[in-house]
Amino acid sequence: MTSVVGGVWEDPPVPHTFVVTVRSRDRLVLCTDGVHDAVRVTAVSARNPSRVAWDLVDAALAVPDADGNATVVVLDVP
């Protein structure tokens, strides 16, 4: 099974793209819908990025009836 951003199958899949302006010390959190739909991903503190990612995954997997699709990438801009 193949899933694409937005949940609409196109052949070939067409990714959703956009430009984001980042500044020094910004933090980007990329996550699957299994995390976004299960937990509130809002202000993410200045903690270690790896810890933030694991905490979000753990929180998403702890939600009853969650789909288990829990992937998080945390990027800190130097």
Image (tube, helix red, strand yellow):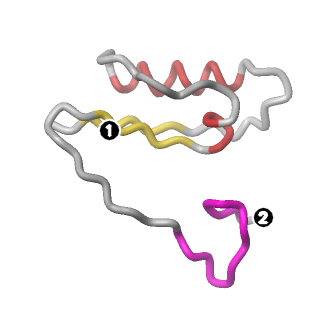
Q: In which quarter of the image is the C terminus?
A: top left
Q: Which residue is drawn at 65% across and 60% down?
A: 6
Q: In this view, does 54 lie above or below 68?
A: above
Location of mark 2 (residue)? 1
Q: What residue type is labelled 2?
A: Met
Label 1: few (<14), some or many (≥20) within 10 Å? Answer: some
Q: Which amino acid does label 1 sit on?
A: Leu
Give coordinates of residue 53: x percent, y percent.
47, 27
Distance of label 2 from label 1 (alpha carbons): 28 Å
Q: Is residue 56 above or below residue 70?
A: above
User: How many numbered markers are drawn?
Assistant: 2
Residue at the right extreme? 65
Which circle marks residue 33 in the picture?
none
Q: In this view, does 33 lie to the left or right of 53?
A: right
Lower position in the chain sequence, tag 2 or tag 1: 2
Location of mark 1 (residue)? 75
**Magenta region's main secondary structure?**
loop
Q: In this view, does 10 lie to the left or right of 64?
A: left
Q: Does the magenta stretch include residue 5?
A: yes
Give coordinates of residue 20: x percent, y percent.
31, 54
Q: Is residue 72 above or below residue 65?
A: below
Residues 39 and 51: in front is 39
Give coordinates of residue 66: x percent, y percent.
78, 31
Give coordinates of residue 35: x percent, y percent.
63, 34
Residues shaded magenta: 3-15
Residues 68 and 39: in front is 39
Q: Residue at x 44, y 66 (%)?
A: 17
Q: Is residue 76 magenta?
A: no
Label 2: few (<14), some or many (≥20) within 10 Å? Answer: few
